[in-house]
Image: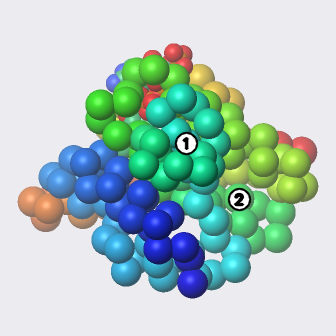
Amino acid sequence: MPQRAVVEAIMRIMNTAFDPAYGEAWNQPQVVAALVLPETRAVLIGEDGAIDPEDLSQVQGFALLRRIIDEEELLLFAVSPEARGKGLGGKLIDHCVASSRAAGCARIFLEMRDDNPARWLYLGHGFKPIGLRRDYYTGADGQRRNAITFMQILA
Ligand SMILES: CC(C)(COP(=O)(O)OP(=O)(O)OC[C@H]1O[C@@H](n2cnc3c(N)ncnc32)[C@H](O)[C@@H]1OP(=O)(O)O)[C@@H](O)C(=O)NCCC(=O)NCCS
């Protein structure tokens, strides 16, 4: 089982970081169910930019990743609203990419709602858009939105 305190730190960010209109946030059982799988992991970032800080009350962002053979997928990624615009998201994504590369992964993928401003972060940190998945997300209003698939070659 994942450490309860880690799940709580993730949920603290989750519950403020995602606009409920888009229905992108996961609930706690979904996070726990993902993290019990051996191929899935969480990376946390503290307010001072430390990766996986010991003091979990300092956590201001998280990434959930899944590694299958030599491909990594960034499942979910967020920084708390009050800590944004200070480079934490950039540091976290750079760490995820570097750790995937160090583990021997050949590619890292992610999917993003096509109007999410997070695109600037991904484009600025080595990801390239490689595809469009039509009507991939369903918002709280029932409206469907497209997803863009981004990829970065690591090997
Ligand atoms: C996306 C997110 C993680 C960025 O976190 P952050 O800590 O603010 O990121 P940074 O401060 O490192 O900014 C990263 C870069 O993206 C750019 N950026 C971020 N938001 C932007 C926006 N709305 N418009 C233009 N550029 C933007 C910044 O200019 C910065 O560029 P730089 O590194 O060249 O200076 C954060 O906004 C978030 O949690 N959003 C809600 C959850 C979400 O949508 N997650 C992504 C799901 S795919």
Mark 1 and mark 2: span between their CA atoms?
19 Å
In the foreground, 36 or 153: 36
Instruction: Look at 59% across and 23% down and name the residue there.
Output: 124
Q: Is the CB atom of the residue marked by disc 1 within 8 angstroms of ligand 1's nearest atom?
A: no
Regarding residue 74, the answer to whether it shows in the image is: no
In the rendered view, tell whether residue 124 sits above or below residue 142. above
Per the image, the residue denoted by label 1 is: 45
In the rendered view, tell whether residue 127 sits above or below residue 35. above
In the rendered view, tell whether residue 142 sits above or below residue 94. below
Residue 72: numbered disc: 2
Instruction: Look at 35% across and 61% down and name the residue there.
Output: 11
Residue projecting furthest to the left: 141
- Residue 13 lies left or right of residue 120; in this view the side is left
Crowding near the residue tagged with mark 1, few <14, some 14–19, many ≥20 C-alpha atoms within 10 Å = many
Q: Indicate which quadrant contains ligand 1.
A: top left
Q: Is the CB atom of the residue marked by disc 2 within 8 angstroms of ligand 1's nearest atom?
A: no
SS at mark 1 in the image:
strand
Instruction: Look at 59% across and 60% down and name the residue there.
Output: 42
Residue 137 location (% of width, % of height): 31, 60
Name the mark nearer the viewer: 1 or 2: 1
How many numbered discs?
2
* Colour basis: rainbow
In the foreground, 143 or 96: 96
SS at mark 2 in the image:
strand
Instruction: Look at 38% across and 28% down and name the residue there.
Output: 84
Residue 117 location (% of width, % of height): 37, 31
Q: Amino acid at mark 1?
A: Ile
Residue 91: numbered disc: none
